[in-house]
Image (spheres, grey):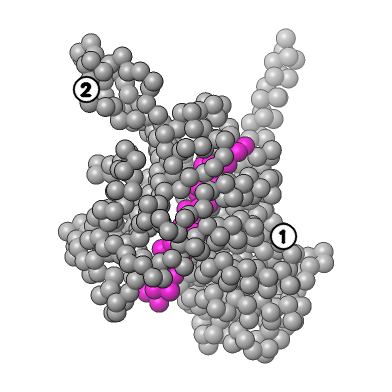
Amino acid sequence: MKNLEGDIMGIIENKIGSVVELCDDPTPEPAGIIIFGASGDLSFRKLIPSMYKLFKNRKLIDFYILGVGRSNFSDDDFRNKVLESLDFKQDVVKKFIEHIYFLSGDYDQDELYINLKEKINILNKKHNTKNNKLFYFATPPNVYIPIIRHLGKFDLNNEDENFSRMVIEKPFGNNLESAKKLDCELHKYLNEKQIYRIDHYLGKETVQNILMMRFANIVFEPIWNYKYIDHVQITVSEELGVENRIGYFENTGLLRDMVQNHILQLLTLIAIEPPASLDANMIHDEKMKVLKSIRRFNVDNLDEFVVRGQYTDGYINNEFKKSYIEEVGKNSKTETFVALKLLIDNWRWSGVPFYIRTGKRLKKKLSEVSIVFKDVPHSIFSDFYPVKFEPNALVIRIQPDEGFKLILQAKQPGSKICINTLNMEFKYRNFFDYEPQDAYERLILDALLGDQTLYVRNDIMEESWKLVTPILERWENSDLYYYPSGSWGPKESDRLIEKDGRRWRNYENI
């Protein structure tokens, strides 16, 4: 009996140990990280702080970070800028800083890449990185192609026993034609396994949790279809306006900035069929099927499915905000709000509309997906409750207060028949004792590990552009609607959903 108990305890300990190992990320191979556009805002605000956290957690050991940019920085100048962006313990930062360097030059000049090749060789030997390289494009999109061509010309992206990978920031093109052109240039010098098209939304904990929630719990799968789901809502709202991104945003707009990438990626995770495994390509295959199944828009009746708007002045939290036109200093038709109704023509989602809205200068900052279920076939409570109950819903909160809740109807203590809405809510911060991981931290680590699951494959990128490009072309000769800052967008977005007998979720008490 004693031996049996010992064997059982050994099995339990092994299983616990296995779970702990699974919950601990692997340590990547040694590598040099080369950031083009390293003197820009993204580098100091997101990239380098994320790399510091990886270093602090011992996920970066033999490595160097080489910033490349037009700024005339020395290594010490760049290190001092990095120090200003890091608010952490000085002793750890000091060790981290020893791995940081800078190289100045023009992206379209051969001289930069001659110096870059020489610098990489020196740093490779100094930090024992085995000639593994991760290039990160944090530059404006108009210099992507010159950089790609020069890296190819000087043989900086070849792989032998080492790896050479490229992380490409959005926007990946500004329409279908430009995206295909950029992709064609990349594939002249790289294979698809070397290309990492980043979408930082996919690195968020709650977005990753969608796969776990759907496919690790049997309770959801039987009802995750047209028989039980009435509709799906995706809301991504910001209180901020365009702030210091006026130049970028004026030439981009919200359909390109949010819908073509972040929101369509989110939609595919909600809508995909179960992949055979967690293999990156199998997940991407299923996402591709969803995108190809989305019903294309008839541009002649586009207003029935798409609403675009732009914010005027107004108040948010009792603070006056200028209109978009005042911020950019000219008349503009650039949209700061988009609402869409999408239909997916496949077996699982037949007749289930997906309503999407996203905008700037809206009433609250939040990102949510609401799976709204159908009513019960027959209510035995209708004689007592003439008012319709709030429908059951599974609400996945991406930000703020990451988590999810299940909305149910339950008996309220007291009277024999007294029903009230019950919110069964889970928040990550109330359950897990963990340091929140920035999305960039997750994605940079995955790129170093060679895991493309949370990145965007080329055919998926192209298919998403096929969906939105006809809208962009039609908008060139059409008007937009206006909404005051601090509202939930133009009234036309309410009519988009209300004409189907539905309404947007109420966020007044959130």
**Which type of secondary structure does the marked residue at label 1 adopt?**
helix
In the image, 326 versus 347, the foreground residue is 347
Q: What residue type is disc 2 on?
A: Pro
Percent of width and height locating residue 406: 39, 31
Q: What residue type is disc 1 on?
A: Lys
In the image, 350 versus 416, the foreground residue is 350
> Which quadrant does the C terminus fall into?
top left
Verify whether residue 248 appears in magenta.
yes
Percent of width and height locating residue 393: 39, 33
Residue 398 higher or lower than 224, as above or below = below
Find disc 1 in the rendering and name its residue. 193
Is residue 42 shown left or right of residue 13?
left
Which stretch did the figure color magenta?
246-274
Mark 2, mark 1: which one is toward the viewer? 2
Percent of width and height locating residue 438: 49, 55
Q: Residues within 10 Å of mark 2 (few under 14, many from 20)?
A: few
Q: Between marks 2 and 1, how big is the CA–CA gap?
A: 59 Å
In the image, 426 versus 510, the foreground residue is 510
**Which type of secondary structure does the marked residue at label 2 adopt?**
loop
In the image, 66 versus 157, the foreground residue is 157
Find disc 2 in the rendering and name its residue. 386
Residue at 69% from the left image edge and 15% from the top image edge: 5
Displayed quadrant of residue 185? bottom right
